[in-house]
Image (tube, rainbow, N blue to C red):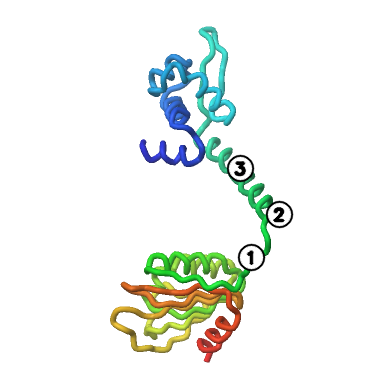
């Protein structure tokens, strides 16, 4: 119960709105008095809460012989409406921000620390690829990146992977064209390189003291890509 309350609040519902909607899902229709009693929302606040839920389209008021009662819309309909609303808000915000922004310098070098952080950026780089990927990795990273690599393959991204472990059999993580070349690993760390097209690159070492850089510097990307291909 607490998790769904937190999730609805993350989507913009107040605590009282969340409690009232959930109470109506569990029993409906209810009038304001009965809903306040069942949900724990103070009676002084319940009609203001119901008005907000009506504005969100989350509840439907119905007039019956005993007066006004309320029923919830289904969870599927609620999530669909929230998704459409949030999509419109994000699209509008993106358009307005682009209109305000000055051009951003794209030749950055971003320093990364920690294995989780490195892999998070690796997944993002792969998920944002739509043309080509050139990658060098070891089996643990192949397993960690298996899902985004599979998604990239399904999008038609051309993937070339250098397997630095020279696995004798497919490990199940790599996609596309796999080339095997054994490199003697450090016991504590080994390398990971991901080049997205000719535009962006992640290169670093994994393991306990993982460090990496993510960059759009074209000269560095070209040199690293040449090294991997030769």
| Viewer-nearest residue: 204 or 55 | 204
Which tag, 1 or 3, sits closer to the chain's start? 3
Residue on which the image places disc 3: 84
Instruction: Identify the mark at residue 55; answer none if there is no mark.
Output: none
- Residue 38 figure quarter: top left
| Viewer-nearest residue: 138 or 18 | 18
Which tag, 3 or 2, sits closer to the chain's start? 3
Q: Residues within 10 Å of mark 2 (few under 14, many from 20)?
A: few
Q: Could one spot residue 68 in this view of the protein?
A: yes
Which tag, 1 or 2, sits closer to the chain's start? 2
Residue that lies at the very extreme toward the top in this rendered image: 65
Label 3 residue SS: helix
Residue on which the image places disc 2: 99
Distance, label 1 to label 2, CA atoms, is 13 Å
Distance, label 3 to label 2, CA atoms, is 23 Å
Residue that lies at the very extreme toward the right in this rendered image: 99
- Residue 119 figure quarter: bottom left
Give x and y (percent) for residue 214.
Answer: 50, 72
Give x and y (percent) for residue 101.
Answer: 67, 57
| Viewer-nearest residue: 190 or 59 | 190
Disc nearest the viewer among 1 and 3: 1
């Amino acid at each position: 119960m607490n998790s769904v309350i937190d999730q609805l609040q993350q989507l913009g519902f107040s605590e009282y709105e969340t409690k009232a909607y959930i109470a109506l899902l569990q029993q409906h229709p209810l009038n304001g008095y009965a809903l306040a009693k069942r949900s724990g929302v103070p009676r002084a606040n319940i009609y203001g809460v119901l008005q907000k839920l009506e504005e969100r389209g989350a509840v439907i008021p119905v007039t019956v012989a005993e007066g006004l009662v309320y029923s919830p819309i289904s969870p599927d309909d609620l999530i669909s409406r929230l998704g459409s609303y949030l999509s419109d808000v994000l699209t509008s915000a993106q358009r307005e921000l682009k209109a305000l922004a000055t051009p951003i310098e794209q030749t950055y070098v971003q320093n990364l620390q920690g294995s989780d952080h490195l892999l998070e950026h690796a997944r993002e780089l792969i998920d944002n690829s739509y043309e080509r990927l050139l990658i060098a990795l070891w089996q643990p990273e192949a397993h960690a990146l298996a899902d985004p690599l599979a998604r990239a393959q399904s999008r038609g991204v051309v993937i070339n992977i250098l397997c630095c472990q020279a696995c004798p059999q497919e490990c199940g993580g790599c996609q596309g064209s796999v080339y095997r070349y054994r490199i003697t690993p450090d016991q504590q760390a080994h390398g990971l390189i991901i080049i997205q097209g000719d535009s962006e690159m992640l290169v670093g070492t994994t393991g306990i003291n993982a460090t990496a850089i993510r960059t759009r510097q074209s000269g560095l990307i070209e040199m690293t890509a040449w090294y991997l291909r030769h």
